[in-house]
Image: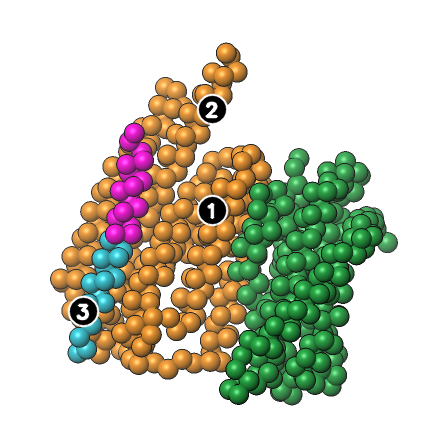
Amino acid sequence: MPENGGYMIAAYLAVAVLYGGYALWLWKRGRP
Amino acid sequence: MPSAVRGALIIASKDLLLEFRSRTAFLSSLAFTALVLAIFNFARDPTVTSAADLAPGILWITFCFAGLLGLNRAFALERENRTLEGLLLSPVSRSSIYLGKAFANLVFVGLVEAVALPLFALFFAVPVTPVLGPLLGVMALATVGFVAVGTLLSAIAVSTRFAELMLPVLMLPFLVPPITSAVQVTSRLFAGRPFSELAPWLKLLGGYDIVVVVTALLIFEFTLDE
Amino acid sequence: MTAIDVAQRSVRRSGAFALGSLALMAAVYVRALAFTPPEATQGQAQKIFYIHAPSAWVAFLAFGIVGICSILYLALKEPRLDRLAASAAEVGVVFTTGVLITGPIWARPIWGWWWTWDARLTSTLFLWFIYFGYLVLRGAVQEPGQRARFAAVLGILGALLVPFIHVTVYLFRTLHPMPVVLNVNGPQLPPAMLTTLLFSFSAFTLFFATLLWQRYAQATLTEARAAAQAEADDRA
């Protein structure tokens, strides 16, 4: 099996930051 | 002649008259197109890449730039002469306005392309005459699609602050089908490929044209104020 | 209850649901990373698929909503449809960005380079640009009625032409096959992987729905406040 777990981590991390970040930003926007 | 078409022709001729009274925009568009073609000659390493390989792409990117310029000049006309407001007060139908503007754009861009084509053949030593008929055909098809989308989006962009920038940003994704098809057909025409290789791209181009023209005719009125 | 109160309650409720669905997404992460076996030929990187494919589904679903709301808006002139379209576009562009990030990260180890003009990724690239144009256009038009009309026209054009862009890209691509380092069209997905994928699709769809609801609720609240302000200004 090729050793490419680093890519997996990078992608999952990027998505967590992107979607989680957006979700949090949106949630904060809704409670001034 | 149905009144919608007559109205469109009146609008188109007024637009073109305004345009060619000064001729500045047209001549500048011609000069721009010629310059782009000339610069493309230097956009490669001649020891590695032949002009023939790049020629179809060069032709259509050049036409694309010329087309965008042609659509943009309409903004300046619009701002100076407020033609749209005048049109809305007159008893022409909304479809006539679209058809008129689209036709004027088509004439303008078509003329620029007509001058650019022989220049292109000259600069890049491309045997255009053997396939002139089909080439003009694909040029007509692609330009119709281009102008159809462009006239609709121009009506939107003209109301924004950076219209000349907004138009390409909105328009370019929608130009992927016609430009790709046009380049693929042109390339195969120059290479003397059989019609069966052109057919799928021509079908795509034709289908695209039908969809954009019909859609534009249906929803253009929503780009105008009530 | 005033319109503002109703809108505020909607914002709060949708916010709660959105945070809840975020927890569901975390569960997807745990399931995919810790409880799903990796694929033998592709390695761990294959697991990117569990967040890449559902993101693409949501990206196009959101755009479908933009398209449908656009058509309905021009027919019915109902501002709520315009608000829903705008909300769907904002949420949609976020997920489209996700596709364009996970795609290349997956492509690099599997196909040898970050960007190979794969037909679906390329279509998604143009989808991103259409979203971008839509959002920039909305920002560039001040008058709400005009903004809604213009956006709807663009939304309809986009919805109709995205299929053409995809056919173009696909036709172009089948004539120019790219070298493949690892063949991803292997055997069918074994049950454990299929379960993870379906779970992920469901969670993503729910997550999208709650984000959309939340965004829409906030837009409604903003609108209600603006209307109340305008009324107060009129009376003064």
Report, in whole angstroms, how far the alpha carbon at label 2 lies from the one at label 1. 23 Å
Q: Chain of mark 3?
A: A
Main SS, magenta residues: helix
Between C125 and C33, the one nearer to me in the picture = C125
Question: Left or right: where does residue C227 sit relative to residue B222?
Answer: left
Q: Amino acid at mark 1?
A: Leu
Which residue bears the numbered disc 2?
A: C227
C214 over C121 or under it: above or below = above
Question: Left or right: where does residue C120 sit relative to residue C101?
Answer: right
Report, in whole angstroms, how far the alpha carbon at label 1 lies from the one at label 3. 36 Å
Which residue is located at x 71 percent, y 65 percent? Answer: B31
Q: Position of residue C9 (x, y in %)?
A: 31, 28
Which residue bears the numbered disc 1?
A: C135
Q: Quadrant of the N terminus of chain B?
A: bottom right
Viewer-side label of 2, 1: 1
B111 over C64 or under it: above or below = below
Which of marks 1 and 2 precedes in the sequence?
1
Kindly state the secondary structure of the residue where label 1 is placed: helix
Which residue bears the numbered disc 3?
A: A5
Q: Position of residue A5 (x, y in %)?
A: 18, 69
